[in-house]
Structures are given as C-alpha cells and as structure tokens.
Image (spheres, rainbow, N blue to C red):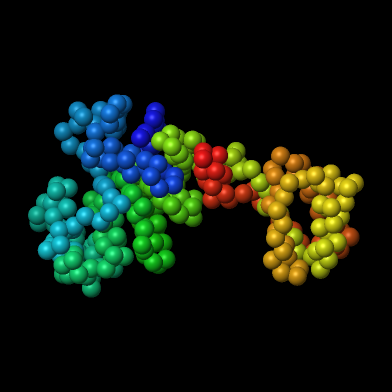
Amino acid sequence: ILENVTFHVNQSECFGLLGPNGVGKSTILNILTNTIPPSYGHIFYDGLNMNELSALNLGYCSQNDIFWNELTVREHLELVLELRGYPKSVIKDTANQYIFYFDLEDYQHRLMKHINEGIKRKVSFLLAICGYPEHIILDEPTSGMDPYNRHFIWKVIQEIKNKCQSSIILTTHSMDEAETLCDRLAILLNGRLSCIGSPEYLTMNYATNYILDIESDVLDLVHEEIFLNPSSIFHRVKYTYEKETTTRCKYTIERKYNVGKLFEILEKAKNENKINDYTITQSSLEDVFIDFIKKSQ
C-alpha cells in the first residue's frame, strides 16, 4: 500500500527507487505504466494528466520477462519497432543495427522459449529502449545478468540519458548500480518515501558512521592510545573494530564525534611513526540504506 508518494523526474535524469522487497516499488511502476489504476492521485507526463493522453512515448522493462514463446528475438524487435511508428522500409535495417550493437546475432532467429534467462533479460531491456522513447521505466533491468552484460546495460542507459535526453526511472537492489546510474534516489519504506536526493546527498546527510582504516606495525599500541586510554577524547566513542591483517584494521565510528580531532590524533601518530597510513571515509550508500530499513522496523 502506497501513501502520499510524490516525486518528479527531470529530462535527461535517471531517478532510482530503492527499497526492500514488498514495499511497493513495482506497484509504483505499474501505476506509472497504467497497468493498475491508482486509488487516488494523478500521474503527469510532460505536464499532461496520463488519463487524458491518447498516446505515450514510453518504454517499459518489467521485473518479469514477458514474451511470445513462439516468436524469435528478431520478430519481437521488429514488432516493437513497428508499434513505435517506424516505417516498414527501415524496420529491418534498424533491427539489424540493434541486434549487432547488443551482440544478439547468434540469438536473433531463436524462439524465445529456447533463450536463456540472462539473454531474455537483455532482450527485455532492448525492447524497452528501442526507438529511444522520451520516458523509460526499468524494473531491476540487470537482474540475473553476468557482470559483462550488466556493465553493457549501464553504458547504454547512460548513453540514452545523455544523448537522447530521456527521463528514466530505475529500480534496483544493487547499490553499485544505483550510484553509477542515478542522478537522484528515493528510498521507499512501508509505502512512503523516506528520503530523496543524489547519492552524494544521501551519504552526506544520512550516514551515521565514519570508516577509519589504519595501517600500522604496532596496531595494538595505536588502538590502546586512541580508544582505550582514559585521557583520550575517543575513550567513550562507540565503535566496532575489525583486525583485517596483522598490520591493517578497520573501525566503524559514530559520526557524531569530532572527526577533525581524530585527524589531529592520527597525524600526530603518523609523525611519530606509529601509523604508516590511514583513511577516513563516510558510510557507503548501502550502509545508509540498511540504516533506514532498521529504523523503519
């Protein structure tokens, strides 16, 4: 069940919807594609109410691959191109270009029922973006793909967004995918949008921890001086500690503490040759996502 979900997607923007299974991401996409009607509220495309549009230039890659088993890959592609308004005189050549670019020559004449799941997903994506529609909706488009094809799909999405100025809505469970592709993200929990912003904005404003990596030949001494010494300002800091090797360890430290003072202490230890090197980073987008889920439970 969705409650007061409102957002907009700009031209030449990839907007990501994140959330655990069952919170309503696919429901939102089904409403946006008019597969199911909203119980209340309105959907607007280019300022026009969707219910008043006679036609909509939209491509949709659903979570579940939907094909006619007795048609080939090429027949599916040529049919969609015809539905998109391509003249019959150019459909064959246009299909050839897509098949070549998507490396589908070996599959083009196979019936869909004989195609493996990874290639089916690739074809679903191709059918959604062929003709470069103004609006594209992608529901977990790279699910089940190998790393090579996943990165190929990422490249195509970026090209379409930048060159064709399409508006793209994407759902994914991959934080790498979300950070790579999305200009803005929304986290959906319990039917509501918990936050909206760029990946950088979300990690900057909602991260709860710093990640400190230390390389030292005297790790135990450094740990004692910074975190165990009663005179240290970090003596009462909440943290987790993971010793990765005999010379490397990682701390997860609550963000509310003074990171500037921590830099000062680490630089002093480095100048005294107690630390070889260190890095301080913010929590990742995945950490932020997990924190939101924990708070909602």
Could you tell me if residue 290 is visible in this image? yes
Judge left or right: residue 157 versus residue 295: left
Residue 210 pos. (x, y %): 68, 48
Could you tell me if residue 267 is visible in this image? no
**Residue 221 sits above or below residue 235 on the image:** below
The quarter holding residue 135 reads top left
Q: Looking at the picture, tell me which residue is in the foreground, 180 or 289.
A: 289
| Outermost left residue | 88
Judge left or right: residue 154 versus residue 133: right
The quarter of the rendered structure image containing the N terminus is top left
Q: Residue at x 88, y 48 (%)?
A: 230
Q: Looking at the picture, tell me which residue is in the foreground, 248 or 72.
A: 248
The quarter holding residue 246 reads bottom right
Q: Residue at x 38, y 37 (%)?
A: 9
Number of numbered discs on residues: 0
Q: Residue at x 89, y 60 (%)?
A: 272
| Outermost bottom residue | 106
Q: Residue at x 51, y 38 (%)?
A: 296
Residue 79 pos. (x, y %): 13, 55
Judge left or right: residue 104 versus residue 196: left
Residue 35 pos. (x, y %): 23, 40
Q: Looking at the picture, tell me which residue is in the foreground, 231 or 199.
A: 231
Residue 270 pos. (x, y %): 83, 59
The quarter holding residue 244 reads bottom right
| Outermost front residue | 297
